[in-house]
């Protein structure tokens, strides 16, 4: 595997590429880590990329502006530029642009949702883990965002979502439920899992992410990963 990073035109933004040299083009996944726009969480970035790579994916992590440079609109631009780069270099990256999706965690889930709803999005599917949907914690994060549920439209790609009933930062009724309602109204294929265990910011919920996440491991909530792969297969998305 070749791992490299390329700078994007959007300042303070880059794209980490985890490229497996293969005999055929693989499905691709663009990963948007969480961190409340104040950091790029390791639990949501390289460890997620490498885990999907072991399942024959080409994976990418977008490092969007955070800390003193944090800006929601500029983060969206960074994601747009990342997808343009991947699509324009699909052949050399051994990625099938028709099987290219996006996954976002927490604040990254908000940006992922926004990009998936763009008119000319390249995302063929989306996955949102305990995402921020409404701008209810903007003051806490120090950014100005939007209600991304209002962006859902008939062209929104199939979407997989999961969260925890114990999540106090992005509770179900304020975030996942609102987005699911929007998907239903627009007749978008979706799957939603609200686990009774776990919590916010638990990433893969296994020991691999737990060792950089205060030993937070939850085998039940961790089932989102195989369920996501199964869902993609059932819909013939990969």
Image (cartoon, rainbow, N blue to C red):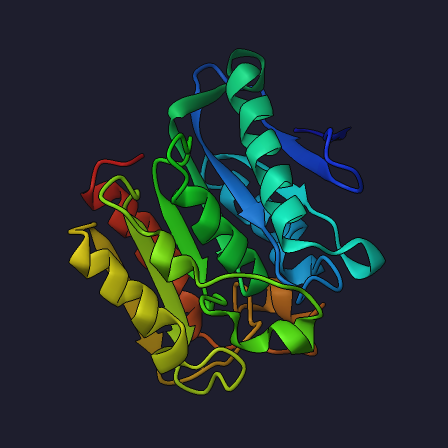
Residue in the image at 20% along x and 42% along y: 235
Q: Nearer the viewer, residue 58 or 11?
A: 11
Q: Quadrant of residue 145?
A: bottom right
Residue 41 % position (x, y): 69, 61
Residue in the image at 45% along x and 66% along y: 133
Q: Is residue 121 visible?
A: yes
Q: Horizontally, is 99 left or right of 181 in the view?
A: right
Q: Horizontally, is 130 left or right of 214 in the view?
A: left
Compared to residue 216, the image places residue 30 above or below, namely above
Q: Residue furthest right?
A: 68
Compared to residue 229, the image places residue 222 above or below, namely below
Residue 94 % position (x, y): 51, 18
Compared to residue 160, the image places residue 2 above or below, namely above
Q: Nearer the viewer, residue 203 or 38?
A: 38
Q: Horizontally, is 149 left or right of 167 in the view?
A: left
Q: Quadrant of residue 2?
A: top right
Residue in the image at 46% along x and 49% along y: 114
Residue 44 % position (x, y): 61, 58
Q: Considering the image in quadrants, where does the C terminus appear?
A: top left
Q: Considering the image in quadrants, where does the N terminus appear?
A: top right
Residue in the image at 32% along x and 70% along y: 178
Q: Quadrant of residue 169?
A: bottom right
Q: Is residue 226 visible?
A: no
Residue 58 % position (x, y): 52, 32
């Amino acid at each position: 595997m070749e791992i490299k990073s390329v700078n994007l035109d959007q300042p303070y933004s880059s794209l980490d590429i985890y490229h497996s040299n293969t005999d055929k083009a693989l499905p691709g996944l663009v990963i948007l880590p969480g961190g409340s726009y104040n950091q790029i969480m390791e639990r949501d970035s390289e460890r997620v990329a490498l885990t999907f790579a072991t399942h024959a994916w080409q994976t990418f992590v977008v490092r969007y502006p955070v800390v003193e440079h944090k800006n929601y609109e500029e983060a969206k631009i960074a994601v747009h530029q990342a997808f343009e780069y991947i699509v324009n270099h699909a052949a050399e990256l051994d990625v099938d642009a028709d099987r290219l999706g996006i996954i976002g965690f927490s604040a990254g889930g908000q940006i992922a949702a926004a990009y998936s709803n763009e008119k000319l999005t390249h995302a063929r599917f989306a996955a949102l883990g305990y995402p921020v949907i409404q701008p209810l914690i903007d003051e806490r994060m120090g950014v100005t965002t939007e209600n991304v549920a209002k962006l859902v439209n008939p062209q929104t790609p199939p979407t997989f979502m999961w969260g925890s009933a114990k999540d106090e930062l992005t509770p179900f009724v304020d975030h996942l439920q609102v987005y699911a309602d929007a998907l239903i109204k627009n007749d978008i294929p979706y799957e939603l899992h609200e686990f009774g265990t776990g919590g916010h910011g638990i990433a893969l919920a296994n020991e691999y992410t737990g060792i950089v996440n205060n030993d937070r491991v939850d085998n039940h909530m961790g089932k989102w990963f195989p369920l996501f792969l199964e869902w993609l297969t059932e819909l013939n998305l990969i």
